[in-house]
Amino acid sequence: MEKLLQVTYLYDFYGNLLTKKQNNIIEKYYLEDLSLSEIATQENVSRQSVHDTIKQAERKLNTYEEKLGLVERFKDQEKELTILVDKLKTIQTDNRDDQNNIIISDVIESMYRLLND
């Protein structure tokens, strides 16, 4: 499951840098959950060819991440935003000023949008 999640993140960030063939096969394997045999039949290639294409695409995606680090940076920012939202909720709970609570609610809402985009 962890590998699926990691490849999905990598694909979201770097998928456009793969070849059309790699892109197509990665989508079918990871996003559509098709087996190697099913993909091979659809693409009219061998099961081994599909396997090799997936491994090559995964290596490419990992290489991009090693060089650019966008996924790791995103995950770090996501953790920080979550921590900040929790702190703001604590402040809001303890705060008696309605005006400040409205502002805090707006900030929390904006942060949730950032987390979910």
Image (spheres, helix red, strand yellow):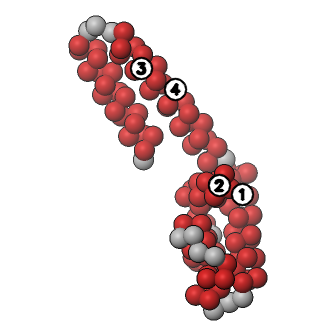
Label 2: which residue? Answer: 1
* Marks 2 and 1 in Cβ contact (< 8 Å): no
Label 3: which residue? Answer: 88
**Residue 85, x across and y down, in percent:** 44, 26
Label 3 Cα crowd, 10 Å radius (few <14 / some 14-19 / many 20+): some
**Residue 101, x across and y down, in percent:** 29, 17
Q: Secondary structure at mark 3?
A: helix
* Marks 3 and 2 in Cβ contact (< 8 Å): no
Label 1: which residue? Answer: 62
In the rendered image, the vertical position of residue 5 relative to residue 104, given as above or below: below
The three-letter code of the residue at mark 3 reads Leu
**4 or 3: tag closer to the N-terminus:** 4
Label 4 Cα crowd, 10 Å radius (few <14 / some 14-19 / many 20+): few
The three-letter code of the residue at mark 4 reads Ile
In the rendered image, the vertical position of residue 85 relative to residue 115, given as above or below: above
Tell me the distance, in whole angstroms, between the alpha carbons under discs 2 and 1: 17 Å
Label 4: which residue? Answer: 83
Q: Nearer the viewer, mark 4 or mark 1?
A: 4
Residue 107 visible to an observer of this rendering:
yes
**4 or 1: tag closer to the N-terminus:** 1
The three-letter code of the residue at mark 1 reads Asn
Query: Residue at the spot x=61%, y=71% of the render?
Result: 29
In the rendered image, the vertical position of residue 40 relative to residue 85, given as above or below: below
Tell me the distance, in whole angstroms, between the alpha carbons under discs 4 and 2: 25 Å
